[in-house]
Image (tube, rainbow, N blue to C red):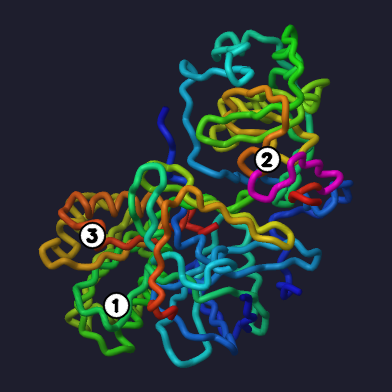
Amino acid sequence: MTLATYDHLDGNAAAGELSSIFAIDVTAAEGQCANCGATKRFAEAHLYMHGPGVVARCAVCEHVLLRLVNARHRVFLDVRGLTYLSLDTAQVQV
Amino acid sequence: MPTISRGFSGRRSAADVKLPPGQYLTTDFPVLSAGPTPHVPLDKWEFAISDGANVLRRWDWKSFRELPSETVTVDLHCVTRWSKLGTTWEGVSLDTLFADLNTDASHVMAHSYGDYTTNLPLNDLRNKQAWIAFRFNGEDLAPEHGGPARLLVPHLYLWKSAKWVRGITLMHHDKPGFWESLGYHIYGDPWREQRYSGE
Amino acid sequence: MWRVGTVVALRDETATARTITLEVPDWPGHAAGQHVDLQLTAPDGYSAVRSYSIASAPNSQKRIELTVERLPNGEVSPYLTQEVAVGDHLELRGPIGGWFVWRAQQTEPIQLIAGGSGIVPLMAMIRSRASAGSSAPFRLLYSVREPEAVFYRDELEVLAHHDDSVSIDYAYTRASPRNWPRPPARIDAALIASATWPSNLFPTFYICGPTSFVETAAGLLSANGNSPDKIKTERFGPTGERK
């Protein structure tokens, strides 16, 4: 079964949505896929957006890294697909 | 209070129709997905009903297409607020697939090619409420809209109509699927505006 | 955190693309390559959010420029390119993005690769380089359908002629100017080899455009001996619109 992968965006596209939870820019964060172990910048993740929620998938194995839902007055975040996410706290935002 | 953008109306058309609360009418057919579009060759496609341990029924594309199908015209309501009215589908009714299957299961989990899942009460799949649909508006269902075949359950929000469906697993308890486990309503009735959990 | 900007100027870049200048009183400043999310809300409450790259260089003014391309079946781009007028208010979030940025402190050779409207954030980098007085060597490979589709044509022309360390190569994919040495074609290995910095200079690459363009270009660069750590990408989706 071949997968068509032309229809994804990347981590840059989700940064605005994720800013409701992350105080530090997430695109430069490094993350490790809990499924295949690939370590990449979040900017390189495959993003599927504008469905019921935001879904970030590993660029290597396509497993879900992170999901986010903006419900009416709550935000739901699932990061089980990441072994870790590492952000540079010294990073200047702008 | 969001800033109103003068003159912006989006892609909707103004028609005086009765829509579920909070919905907007659309004339196109947005493509929303949680992952890459699978391309399933028809000679590999199958649909199975399982009880979690055993496969109870299985159809390949040939045997599936030999089943009696029907054409229905239904309205679609997506939880992202668009509604598309009067869509025509051809599919096999779940009543046909369950015809001689006895079960005391109360719920099902629908599984798709890829990793998408969604849960429903078994009763919501029966009594002319659900189909495995393979044609849309007179043409073979395109992959981006769930082809070769998708689940179609129009009385619930469209996230329950799993694209690229590959089977259903019978359950004796309700369990949340992909979106239900992340804040979406476990049932999803658009007429009671059951978008999110706790509503 | 949403801000409100006022449209203070509009400028057509091509028959289908327009630059919108927004005055944003509480704008915190931005880095070249960052984008904003615009939220459009209809009177009945219906809303749509789209991302647009900032085209203007970082500066101390509270103004930013966005260049928007009108897509045939777009929901938001027709409104932004044809309906929006000076004086209108637009709701925005940003600046967003800390990875796909170029800062004037970078001195290494920079290779920019644009696919269609992907030129927008790369133009912010080119403008940033100019306003910062940087002498970092820049090359731009701009893949575009035809000459009429080029954004910022005059500005790029002036740059190419007056600055020895910015060079520009155009790759036309559907129709090229008369006597153009290369027939219309998508970017390929030969073009990458001839029109980009060689890998032994260890340039940093910025690729922006539709998803399929970015994936193709990134693959060609990797095959040409460049390390993935040196390649930064930003995808605009199959239609070129980020949604």
On the rendered image, what quadrant is the N terminus of chain B found in? bottom right
Query: Horizontal and vertical percent for residue C153?
Result: 36, 74
- The residues colored magenta run B181-193
> Does label 1 lie on the same chain as label 3?
yes
Between B192 and A66, the residue placed more toward the observer is: A66
Query: Horizontal and vertical percent for residue A24?
Result: 48, 72
Closer to the eye: label 3 or 2? 2
Apparent side of residue B20 relative to residue C194 in the rendered image (left or right)? right
Whether residue C75 is visible to the viewer of this picture, yes or no, is yes
Q: Is residue B51 magenta?
A: no
Query: Which residue in the protein does label 1 denote?
Result: C157
Query: Horizontal and vertical percent for residue C219?
Result: 27, 49
Instruction: Identify residue type, mark 1.
Output: Glu
Name the chain letter of the residue that bears numbered label 2: B
| Above or below, B46 relative to B33 | above
Q: What residue do we see at 45% from left, 70% from top?
A: C97
User: Element type at marker 2?
Assistant: helix
Q: Residue furthest left?
A: C200
Instruction: Identify residue type, mark 2.
Output: Trp
Query: Which residue in the protein does label 3 denote?
Result: C180
Label 2 to label 1: alpha-carbon separation: 50 Å
Query: Which residue in the protein does label 2 denote?
Result: B159
Q: Image quadrant of residue B150?
A: top right
Circles 3, 1 touching at the beta carbon (< 8 Å)? no
Q: Earlier in the sequence, mark 3 or mark 1?
A: 1
User: Element type at marker 1?
Assistant: helix
Label 3 to label 2: alpha-carbon separation: 51 Å
Name the chain letter of the residue that bears numbered label 3: C
The image shows a total of numbered marks equal to 3
Q: What residue do we see at 59% from left, 68% from top?
A: A20
Instruction: Identify residue type, mark 3.
Output: Trp
